[in-house]
Image (spheres, helix red, strand yellow):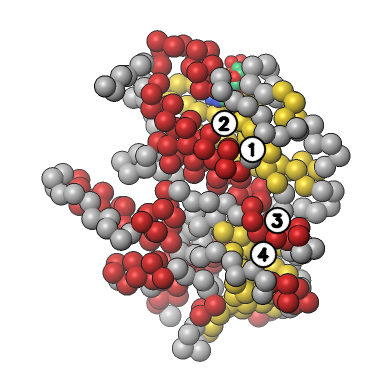
Amino acid sequence: MNTRTEVNELGEFGLIDRLTKNIEFQNASSVLGVGDDGAVIDHFGKQTVVSTDMLLEGVHFDLMYTPLKHLGYKAVVVNLSDIYAMNATPTQITLSIAVSNKFSVEALDEFYEGVYAACDKYGVDLVGGDTCTSKTGFTISITAIGEVAPDQFVLRSSARKGDLICVSGFLGGAFLGLTLLEREKHIFLDSPGVQPDLENEEYIVGRLLKPEARPDIIQFFAENDIKPTAMMDVSDGLSSDLLHIATKSNLGCVVYEDKIPIHEDAKQAAFKFGLDPTAAALSGGEDYELLFTLPQSDYDKLVLNEQISVIGYMTEPEEGCRIITKGGNQFNITAQGWNAFKEQ
Ligand code: ADP
Ligand code: MG
């Protein structure tokens, strides 16, 4: 039988204790964790990378179709992705939550199950956080901490002219998953009796609800003596993220539509929804792949990794940021890539 325990039955300290009592550290750098005024971390001569993100109910997630366990998992993963995007290895997180009385203790247990599943998978320790009540929605704030060998961190702003533009994995899937779930949600709201039609859509739904970060790519760099000239994770969509690297590096870029990696299942879904798969990749976002630039001399090393696609190269700033379509036409890339792309 499902029991429901109200948060105020446990009290703030009882709740924190319940949510954190089984923590076992995985990193020697985690010296002191939950239970005092602060955590203590010793990075033994490495440099420390820190990144924070907030997730708000109704803005970043919709609890109508996001299971709490997935939400906990994703909240951690998207923060770790930022650390990997610095070419660093995440080691600790702090997690702060604001919850309304809509949430039972059991619901929070479920959320933390996802949090700990991600911590285990990526080898990071939860070392602290904060808990407070919310009068509105559920709010999650995570700070991720990582380590990097001195001067191995990679900025967005240091791409060089002629560098290859590369991306890991596949793009556009998460946006198509979101499109599907939003569509099903509206059908459900209009006629609650109708069961959602998610058949054969595991790939795109998974890309949205349970994204993964790319430690394997960072490891591949280390093993092959590769240091990208610039890097970031693809969270806002390829267009917007490419523009960040180009603008911050004071360069232009050219990418080829036929080189943009899109999973077969995502292409199928796009056709079903009447959307352009390239548009989904350009402006969709939430893919959490790594976008990076490398000198052309590293090309031979790249072919060793089939998870990496070369999609274009950096140019003089005067040339702007352009995409060459499959049909050989050229368009400017704009932050809102897909509208502009379709209209021209
Ligand atoms: P303070 O009064 O100093 O803010 P708290 O009572 O909020 O301390 O927190 C006590 C301990 O529990 C601290 O180590 C804090 O980092 C940790 N903590 C609080 N909330 C959470 C949470 N939601 N998840 C993990 N750790 C938490
Ligand atoms: Mg506190």
Q: Residues within 10 Å of mark 2 (few under 14, many from 20)?
A: many
Q: Please identify the quarter of the rendering in which residue 10 is found.
A: top left
Q: Which residue is mark 4?
A: 292
Kindly report which numbered mark, 1 or 2, lies closer to the viewer in this rendering. Answer: 1
Q: SS class of the residue under badge 4? A: strand
Report the disc number at residue 124.
Answer: 1
Distance between the Cα atoms at labels 4 and 1?
Answer: 24 Å
Look at discs 3 and 4 and give the one toward the viewer.
Answer: 3
**Residue that carries the numbered disc 2 in the rendered image:** 95
Q: Which residue is mark 3?
A: 219
Left or right of 276? Residue 46 is right
User: Residue 123: image x %, image y %?
Assistant: 63, 40
Above or below residue 224? Residue 103 is above
Mark 1 vs 2: CB contact within 8 A: no
Across and down, in percent, residue 58 comes to 38, 41
- Determine whether, in the image, residue 40 is placed left or right of residue 136: right
Q: Amino acid at mark 1?
A: Val
